[in-house]
Amino acid sequence: MIKKWFLTIVLGGSMVALAACGDDTAKDTEGEETPQEEVATEQESGEQPEMPKPDLEGIPEVVAEVNGEKISKEDFESIYTEQFEQMAMQSQMSGQEVDQSQLKEQVADSLVAQELLVQETEKQKLTASEEQKIQR
């Protein structure tokens, strides 16, 4: 149970940090609408842009292996889908497309980092006190 809470907290913090590091520069070209203008035009006409779908093709059964512990496709897909949906909603507001290859890499890196943290806490035999558990 502690491991699940710890993983959830670490993953959430990692995803927030990774999302904040995204590239938000846009180049305007003459005569073409920027993504923000396209969104504004769609909003004025009352049409909602279609929500993009996550690309889950080609993901191996074992996404990564960390010191003998495997990160499964199912674990990766659940986190990736959740993060993709959040970014897709943000992209609808900003008009930028979600870079799925970058997101996949970030999610995989985050899962590896999480697993390393879990392994280190187990190695050091770190546990939360009852008071710390209740505060969460």
Image (spheres, rainbow, N blue to C red):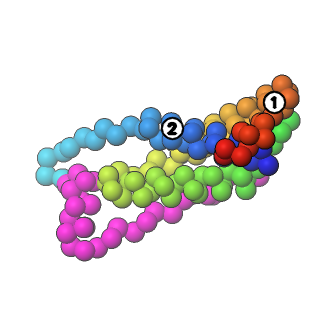
Is residue 5 or residue 116 the one in the foreground?
Answer: 5
- Res. 45 image quadrant: bottom left
At a point 51% along the width and 38% down the height, the residue shown is: 18
Q: Residue furthest top?
A: 124
Mark 1 against mark 2, which lies toward the viewer? 1
Q: Residue furthest front?
A: 131
The amino acid at mark 2 is Leu
At a point 40% along the width and 54% down the height, the residue shown is: 90
Q: Is most of the magenta stretch helix, strand or loop?
A: loop
Q: Secondary structure at mark 2?
A: helix
Tell me, yes or no, whether the highlighted magenta stretch contains residue 46.
yes
The amino acid at mark 1 is Leu
Q: Name above or below for residue 91 compared with residue 18.
A: below
At a point 64% along the width and 42% down the height, the residue shown is: 9
Disc 1 crowd rating (10 Å Cα; few below 14, some 14-19, many 20+) is few
Look at the image and give the residue range highlighted in magenta: 33-62
Do we see residue 62 in this rendering?
no
The label shown at residue 18 is 2
The tag earlier along the polypeptide, 1 or 2, is 2
Do we see residue 31 in this rendering?
yes
The label shown at residue 126 is 1
Q: Secondary structure at mark 1?
A: loop
Q: Name above or below for residue 95 compared with residue 106.
A: below
Give the image location of residue 40, x and y in percent: 22, 61
At a point 51% along the width and 49% down the height, the residue shown is: 100
Is residue 10 or residue 61 the one in the foreground?
Answer: 10
